[in-house]
Image (cartoon, rainbow, N blue to C red):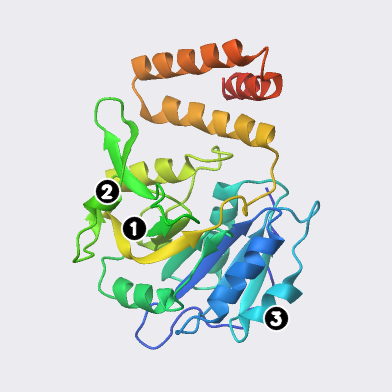
């Protein structure tokens, strides 16, 4: 897999006084519109962002236009990194990590999905303050609410028997102190980590084409002793339906492959058998009424092996 990396670097990512800089990374696939909204949110942050690195995973089918982004970013530096067409979130994040390390960045990275919103304008400032007192091996996620104000599944715990994601954080579990919660898994939609603080440096598994790559990374980093923390504040927003433009059947095929990979890597054999049989039987029963969706699932199971 080849990635085109900018040859020049206008920014010194090695040192910013005594503070480890926080760089924002977004992986885009057919995401021009939501990225423009996110650019406006980043541009009005109370603390100036050191760098926003955007990985374009659709350089052939829908290449990003940086002009609308830069127009609303004001003084925030923007850098586009050309990725491979349809490479996926995991591969895009890894490309960003490697590019930043090559440029000398050894600090924190804030992964933000293109359809995330920063409603208050001080989210960056609050997170920059929080990370300064943290173990560099810590990994953190933030609260995310949907358009209706409901808390989304951005973190939670693993069922010890099934070894699978079962419990998510509920609003009732957030107390008035807004203290961070120790969790077993974190969503990649808003994830803060310092990849170089881990040995080997933290990387997503590119074998997960869609979904479950964040769950896999959470499990691996937690197993190495990294603290996983969920921050009740700041609260971010999520615009439903404003992410990538991958067709629903294609997304179902890719997510099925990721699901099967997670089962194989992290679950007991009996859990794999039970869940795969249920998935297979459901797809076969729905085949007469939902042929495209059913074939997407069946082909995903077949490719996953």
At 63% from the left edge and 76% from the top edge, which residue is drawn? 78
- Give the mark nearest the N terminus, 3 or 2: 3
Tell me where residue 34 sits by quadrant: bottom right
Of badges 3 and 2, nearer the viewer stands 3
At 42% from the left edge and 78% from the top edge, which residue is drawn? 122
Find numbered disc 1 in the image and state the secondary structure of the residue it sits on: strand
At 57% from the left edge and 40% from the top edge, which residue is drawn? 210
Q: Which mark is residue 183?
A: 2
Quarter of the rendering occupied by the C terminus? top right
Q: Is residue 101 visible?
A: no
Residue 104 picture location, percent across and down: 50, 73
- Give the mark nearest the N terminus, 2 or 1: 1
Of badges 1 and 3, nearer the viewer stands 3
Q: Which mark is residue 71?
A: 3
Tell me where residue 168 sits by quadrant: top left
Of badges 2 and 1, nearer the viewer stands 2
Tell me where residue 103 sits by quadrant: bottom right
**Closest to the observer: 169 or 99?**
169
- Give the mark nearest the N terminus, 1 or 3: 3
Q: Is residue 254 left or right of residue 201?
A: right
Label 1 and label 3: CA atoms lie apart by 32 Å
Q: Which mark is residue 139?
A: 1
Name of the residue lying farthest toward the front: 148
Q: Is residue 164 above or below residue 121?
A: above
Residue 53 picture location, percent across and down: 59, 68
């Amino acid at each position: 897999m080849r990635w085109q990396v900018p040859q020049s670097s206008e920014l010194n990512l090695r040192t910013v006084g005594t503070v480890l800089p926080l760089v924002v990374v977004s992986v885009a696939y057919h995401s021009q519109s939501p990225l423009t909204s996110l650019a406006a949110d980043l541009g009005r942050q109370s603390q100036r962002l050191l760098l926003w690195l955007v990985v374009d995973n659709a350089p052939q089918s829908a290449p990003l236009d940086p002009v609308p982004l830069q127009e609303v970013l004001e003084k925030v530096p923007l850098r586009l990194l050309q990725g491979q067409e349809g490479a996926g979130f995991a591969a895009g994040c890894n490309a960003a990590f490697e590019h930043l390390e090559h440029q000398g960045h050894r600090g924190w990275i804030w992964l933000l999905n293109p359809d995330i919103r920063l409603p208050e304008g001080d989210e960056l400032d609050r997170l920059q303050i929080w990370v300064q007192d943290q173990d560099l091996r810590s990994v953190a996620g933030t609260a995310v609410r949907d358009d209706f104000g409901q808390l989304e599944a951005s973190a939670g715990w693993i069922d010890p028997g099934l070894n699978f994601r079962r419990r998510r954080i509920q609003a009732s579990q957030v107390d008035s102190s807004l203290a961070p919660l120790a969790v077993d898994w974190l969503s990649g939609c808003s994830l803060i980590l310092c990849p170089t603080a881990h040995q080997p440096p933290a990387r997503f598994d590119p074998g997960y084409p869609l979904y479950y790559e964040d769950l896999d990374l959470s499990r691996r980093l937690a197993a190495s002793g990294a603290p996983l923390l969920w921050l009740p504040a700041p609260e971010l927003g999520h615009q439903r339906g404003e992410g990538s433009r991958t067709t629903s059947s294609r997304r179902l095929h890719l997510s099925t492959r990721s699901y099967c990979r997670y089962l194989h890597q992290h679950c007991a054999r009996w859990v794999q058998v039970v869940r795969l049989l249920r998935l297979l039987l459901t797809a076969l029963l729905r085949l007469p009424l939902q042929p495209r969706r059913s074939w997407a699932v069946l082909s995903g199971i077949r490719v996953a092996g």
